[in-house]
Image (tube, coloured by chain):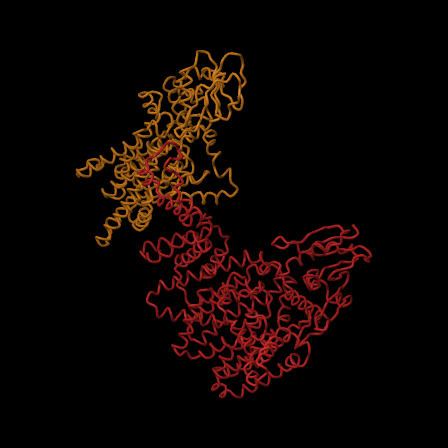
Chain colours: A orange, B red
Amino acid sequence: MKYFLIKDKLNLIALLIIVLLAAALRIWQITGNPPSLFVDEVSNGYNTYSILKTGRDEYGNFMPLTFRAFGDYNPALSVYLLVPTIAIFGLNEYGVRLPSAILGILIVLIVYVLALEIFQNKKIALFSSLLLAISPWHLQFSRYDHEANFMLFFSVLGITLFLSGIKKHTFLIFSAISFAFALNSYHAAKIWVPLIIIATIFIYRKELSRAKANLVIPSTIIIISALPIFLNFKNSLIRGQSVSILNNEKAPLEVFIRGYLSHLSPNFLFVQGDPIGRHSVKGIGQLYVFEAPLILIGLISLIKIANKSQNQKLLLGWFLVAPIPAALAIPTPHALRAIALIPAISLITAYGLFIIINSQVGKIKKVLILAAISTVASYNIITYFHLYYIHEPNIKSPDWSYGYKQAINFIESIREDNQIIAFTNYYGHPYIYVLFYTKHDPKSYQLDQNKERVGGYEFFGENWEKPNNEKAILARAPWQVTYNPNLKILKSIHGPSGEVFFVITEE
Amino acid sequence: MKIVLITFISMILVFKHVNIPTCNTKTATLALKPRIFQQTTIDGSLQNTYLTRFFHNKLGILGSEFGKCYFNFFDPVIIAQNTLYIGFISWIFLAYKILSLKKLKILIPVLFFPILPFLNIPFPVAYFHKIFAIIGLLTMFKITLSSKHLLGAVLIFAIFLRFYKLADVPIALYWDEVSLGYNAYSILKTQRDEHGNFMPFTNFAAFGDYKPPLYIYSAVPSIAIFGLNEFAVRFPSAFFGVLTVILTYYLTLELTASRKIALVAGLFLAISPWHLQFSRGAFEANLGLFFSTFAIYLFVKSTKTKWLIIPSLLSFIAAMYTFTGQRLFVPFILIVLLIQFRKQLLNNIRFVLVALFLAGFFFWPLYRFATQTIEGRLRFEEVTIFRDLDPINESVRYRQTDNFTWWADLIHNRRLNYLNQYLIHYFDAFNPSFLFSRGDVNPRLSVQEVGELYYIDLPLILAGIYFLFAKKQKYRFLIISWLLISPLGPATARETPHALRMIHILPTFQVIAAYGAYHLYQRIKFKRAYFGIIILFLAANFFYYLHMYYIHWPKNYSGEWQYGYKQAVNAVKPLLSQADNVFVSNYLGRAYIYFLFYMPVEPQDFWQSKDVFKDKFSFIHVNGFGKFRFVESADFTKIKGKSIFVMPQGSTPKESMLIGEIKDLQGKTVFEISQLPN
C-alpha cells in the first residue's frame, strides 16, 4: 500500500489527471449514451428498488442471494451494489448506471497499483492506467450497468490485494473478500474466479506454503462465498446450460479451442469487435489499432522475462485464462464474458510501449517510431470518441430497447384513471419497463397475483382483444397497427435516427 | 525416430483440409464510397462535411476493409484449423522465436503474404501457415538435419506423395491401365495373356497396341497381393517412382559429388508435377524411366566398379522392354555415354564386350519384333511425322511454282521439309508454355493448370546451365546431352510436346535446377533472403499444384479417365444372373476390358466365349463374350430374352425401362442402364 504515498509529485499529478479523465469519460452523458436503459439494467434497477423499499425482490423473495429476474438467476451483487445509488438518485439512469461507472473509475487506480506491483516501474503503471482509462472495451462496459464490470473490479482488486498479501499476510483476507464479491457478481465469474485463484495459488505455491496459518480465514471466506452458488445449484446452472458449449455442441473440445482462439483474433480485437451491438462500437474493434504492435512487443518481452518474476508469470497466466469463460459458451468471441482480458491487455500494452520507449535504437529512429504511434493513436482515439458520442446512440438505439421510456412517459402523461392500456411485448419484457418508469409500488406488485397486468397495463403478443367498449390506449410496434375506423394516432415514438419504435393509438 | 514422427505430422498437416476465409475483393471498391456515413449520415441528421471527411474518410474505411480481410489470415482460429493443434503450437513457437530473436527481416514476406487473397489467390496463404508450422516443428524439436535424415524425409515425402489416395486420384482407371491390370491378372492365373498367348516375351497384343511386357509382369506380384483393383495396378508405377527419386539422389551424388545438390535434386523430383503425374497412374513410361535412369547410374558407377557395365546395359534393355518410347532413347543416350566415358570404356573393354553380348542376346527378339513384324512397326508408323504427306505435297507445290528448276529441287527438297517439321517438333519439347505454364495438352498427362516444371525452376535451370559450364563441371556433357537428346525420339511423332513419350528427360531438369540452386546460394550475398524466396515460391507453386491435382483436376477431367465404366459394371453385376444378354455401347471404346477387370472374369471363361476380330491395322476388337455384347450402335429389334442395356444418353431403346444412370463428376450422363422386357 506504500505506493499511494507517492513522493514523485509529477507522477501523482499525472495519475490524478488520468483518474479525472477516466471519471469524465465514464460519467459524462451517462444518461443518454448508451441511448436508453437496456432490459437487464431496468430489471436490476427495479429489483434494487424493490429491495430498498420492501427487502424483497420482484418475486417477493426476502433478501435473495440469487435474483431470478427473467429466469437467469443473477448473482447477488448485480442488485445489491445498486442500492446506495438508487437510494440517493432514485429510480433513474443515474441510479442504475453510476455504480458501474464508479467502479470503472476506481479500477483505473487499482490497475496503477497492480502495474506498479508487477513491473516495479511507475511509467508502466501510468501507461497502464491511462490505456485502461481510454480503452474502448472498458469504456463500453463501464458506461452502463452490467454485473460483468463488477466482477472485473473485484477480481482485479482481489489480485492486487493478493500481491500485497504475499508480503503482508493480513491482506490475504481482504483479497479473499474481494474474490468473494467477484464470485457473486456475474455468471462467468463461476468459471473465471476459480480459475484465476487456482492460477494464482499455483504460481505462488512456495510463498503461500510459508503462510499456512494465515490461509485459514481467506479460504473460509472463499468457501462461504461459494455457498450461494451451491445452495442454489440448480438455478445457478440455468444460465450456464443455455449458453454452454457442453450442452449445445457435438464436438465441445474443438468448439472450445476455436472459441478460445477467436478472442485472440486480430479482427475481433482491432477491426470488427464483438458482433453484439451493445458490446462494441460500430466502426472500430475492441481495442485501438495502434495497440496491436504494442501488445505483440509487450507479450514477447513479457514471455522473455517472465521466468524471473512470478508477478509477471501471473500476468501471463491471467492473459491466458481470461478467454476461457467466454470460450466455454456460445457465441464467441464475446467481449463481455472475456471482460477479464481488458486489464491484462492494458498492462501488456503499457509494457510494450515502455519497451519501445526504452529500446536501444537510435534517437531519430525512436522519435520516428513514437511519432508514428502517436499519430495513429490520436487518430484512433479521436475517431473512437466521435463514433461513440455522435453516431453510436443513433445507430445502436434498437440494440438498447430504445423507446420504452418515451412511450411509457407519454402514456402516463395522457392516461385517465382506470383506463386500460394495451402494450405490445414485441420488444420483450415490457412489464419491467412499466414497473421501472412508472415507479410502481414494489409491494403491490409482489402481492399482485395477475402478472399479465401491471398498473392498468395489459401486455399482448400478436393481437389484443378489447374487453369492453371503453376507450383504450394501445402501444404497438408500427407493423402491428391495423386499420380501424375508430383508430386515432396519439403519438409515434421515434428513435434518434428517425425510425419508429412505438405507435401509440387510442381506440 | 524423431524425424519420422515429424515427417508424419508434417504430412498430415499438409493434407489437412484447407480452410481459408473468403476475402471479398470487391469490398475495397465498395469502400471507396464511404459506406458507413455519408454527409447525411445513415443514422439520421446531417453532419458537417469536414467532420465527415475527417472521421469517415475513404482511406480510413478502405483501411478498415483491408484490415478485416488482411487480419483474417492471421486469425488464430484460421491458423489452428489449417495446421491442427500441434501445428498451431509450433506456429506460435516459431513466431515467438522469430520475434524474440529479432529476426524481423523474415517477417517481411510473412506480412506480405495475406495480400495474396486480394489478388484472388487465397490458397497459398493457408499453405503458408502449414509450412510455417512445419518449420516451427523442426525448430521446436531442435532438429539439425543431417543429409541422412533429409534423404529419409525426402523419401517419406516421395512415398506419401505417390501413394496417398493412389486408388482414387486419378479418378478412374483408363483403358491402358485396365488392360495392363487384366493381362497381369491373366498371367497370374493362367500364365497366359488375355488372348491366351503363353508368357509373351516381346509384346502383349492387348487392344492391338502390342504393349511391351515388363510393366505387366511387374504388376503380377502386386495383383497377387492386393487383388485386382486400382491400387494394385498402379502400385508398380508408384513404387518405381519412389525408387527413381532415390536413384536421382545417388546419381546426382555420383555426378556432382555433393550431398546437398543430390538432396535438392531428389526433392525436386519428389515434388515434380511431371514425375508425380506418371508415378500415380499405371504408366509403362514411368517404369521405363526407372530402368533407363538406373542404367545410366550403373553406367556412371561402372567407371569405378567395372562389372557394373553388365547390369547397366541389361537395364537399358529392360527399359526398351517396358516402354516403346525408350527404344528411341536408349541408342542416343548410349552414344552420349560412350563419348563421355570413352577412356574408361576402353579400359574396361572385357566387361563391355560381355555386356554387349548379353544385351544383344536379350535385345534380339525385341529387335526382330519391332522391325520385322507388321504389328511391331505399325504403332510407330501410326504416330510418326515421316508418314505425313504434307511436307511432300508442299515441296511439290513450291517446286511447281518454281517450274521444277534444279535449284528449286534443292531449296524445296522434301527431305528439308521433313527436317523442318522434325525440328519444329523437336523444339516443341522446350516450349516454355509446355514446361512452365500449361503442361501437356492431354488432360490425362498433366493437370492442365500447372506446367511440367515449376516456375521457380526456370531461373534455377538457367543458373544451373550457366554454372555447369562456368564451373567446368566434369559431367556437363553427359547432363546437357541427356537433356538435348531426350526429345529426339518423341519429336518423330505428331503430338508434341508429349510429356509421356519424353519422360526420360527426367531427372535432368531437376539435377540442373538443383545444381543451379546450390551454386546460386554459394554466390549470392543475401543467403537467407534467397533461401526464403526460393522456399516461398516453391511452396506456393507446389501447394497450388497439389490443390489442383487433388481437388479440381479429378472433377474436371473425369471423362478423360473413362470415369463411369467401373460404376456401370458395378451396376450391371447384380442384374447379370437374371439377364440373357447385356448390350454395352462401345462409344467410349474398349468397354470389354472394363467388364473383364471389374467383374472380374476368369481368363479361361473369356477365351471360351470371346468374339474377337482383328482389323487391317492389327487392332483387336472384342465384340462380345459370355452374355456381353459390345456394340457401336445396335439393332435392338431382333433381341430375344431378357436384356440389359448400357448405353449413352439417347441410344437407350425407347421401350426399355431405365433403371440407372451413371454420371461423371461434371454431371454429364455417361451411361444409362436399362432393361428389356420390363
For the residue pair B235 and A225, the one nearer the viewer reads as B235
B484 relative to A409, above or below: below
Location of the N terminus of chain A by quadrant is top left
Image: A272 above or below A80? below
The location of residue B11, given as percent across then percent down, is: 49, 58
Residue B52 percent coordinates (x, y): 34, 38
Residue B421 appears in the figure: yes
| Residue situated in front as seen by the camera: A318 or B242 | B242
Q: Residue at x 54, y 57 (%)?
A: B550
Establish if A256 lies above or below B654.
above
Between residue B276 and residue A243, name the one nearer to us.
Answer: B276
| Residue A310 x %, y % | 30, 45
Front residue of B51/B391: it is: B391
Question: Which image quarter: residue A218?
Answer: top left
**Does the image show residue A219?**
no
The image quadrant that residue B597 belongs to is bottom right
* Residue A366 at x, y percent in the picture: 24, 51
Q: Is residue A125 left or right of residue A342?
A: left
Left or right of A129? Residue B403 is right
Q: Viewed as shown, does residue A464 lie left or right of A273?
A: right
Count how many numbered circles sit on residues in the image.
Answer: 0
